[in-house]
Image: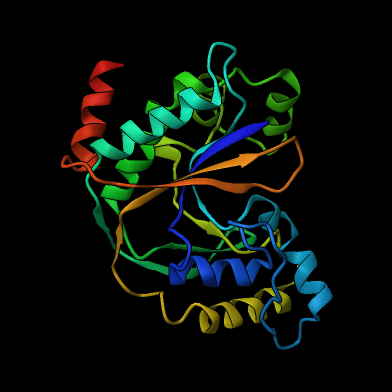
Amino acid sequence: MRYAIYFAGPTGDPLMDLGNQWLGRNVFSGAPLVQPTVSDVLPTRLAELTADPRRYGFHGTLKAPFALANDKTEADLVAACQVFAGSVAPFETTGLHVSKLGKFLALTPIGEDEELQSFAGLCVRTFEQFRAPLPANDLARRRQSGLSHRQDRHLVAWGYPYIFDEFRFHMTLTGKLQDSDEADALERAAKIHFCEVVGLRRTCSTVGLYVEPERGAPFQVHTIFDLTGTVPPEQLAVRSEEVQ
């Protein structure tokens, strides 16, 4: 069993509804959903191209999937999430847009988003105490992607290479797209599909705890926590860096 701390909204959030439909699975219930029609891409092909993000569920990574440390329990993690959510104030984001991120299609921030960047770093540091060390096979698998020296240091120290200075927030919409025509068709379709939520500033007022019941199983929402604190993420992030 693994857990992850993700950027996610509650049930009924338009962004979550559209993301779930795009990927073809309701991350709250696990129920399959009919994906949108994409011109020049067959439904079976769309299902294939979205298989990997569909398993992880619609989300933005904050603290990447981790197994629990031996001295921690799920109840401990849930309690820590409650304390964390009760300390962080809701904050404004720059909003999202559909973009190509390497070979992938994703929703990414419009311009620099320092508060969201701080929030992600805060999540990494806060929940590190709950992470079991990565086994050797996971380290080897990650290193196959050709990590930089800094990314490799992050991987060893924190269990994930793309954090802090290497972090780029994204909500993944596809697997790797090798065909440029498919990539263009999916980008056009995604811009239409998400048109009601992209380009708008968004208040981040929740954080999600997701769970993978067993390795390789689909991730589902465990709990969505409301941010009810009074301190902005950037201030808390500075404090956490000073402590560590």
Give above or below for 55 relative to 99: above
Q: Position of residue 217 (x, y in %)?
A: 75, 44
Which residue corresponds to the image point at 72% horizontal and 54% vertical from the top-left? 52
147 relative position to 122: left or right: right
Q: Seen from this angle, which residue lies furthest right?
A: 44
Which residue corresponds to the image point at 24% horizontal and 45% vertical from the top-left? 228
Q: Nearer the viewer, residue 219 or 161?
A: 219
Which residue corresponds to the image point at 41% horizontal and 28% vertical from the top-left? 79
229 relative position to 150: left or right: left
18 relative position to 10: left or right: right
Give above or below for 29 relative to 80: below
Structure colour scheme: rainbow
Q: Nearer the viewer, residue 18 or 101?
A: 18
Which residue corresponds to the image point at 27% horizontal and 49% vertical from the top-left? 114
Q: Position of residue 129 (x, y in %)?
A: 45, 19
Based on the displayed image, in which of its 4 quarters is residue 222 positioned? top right
Where does the N terminus fall, quadrant-wise?
top right
Q: Seen from this angle, which residue lies furthest bottom?
A: 39
Give above or below for 242 relative to 208: above
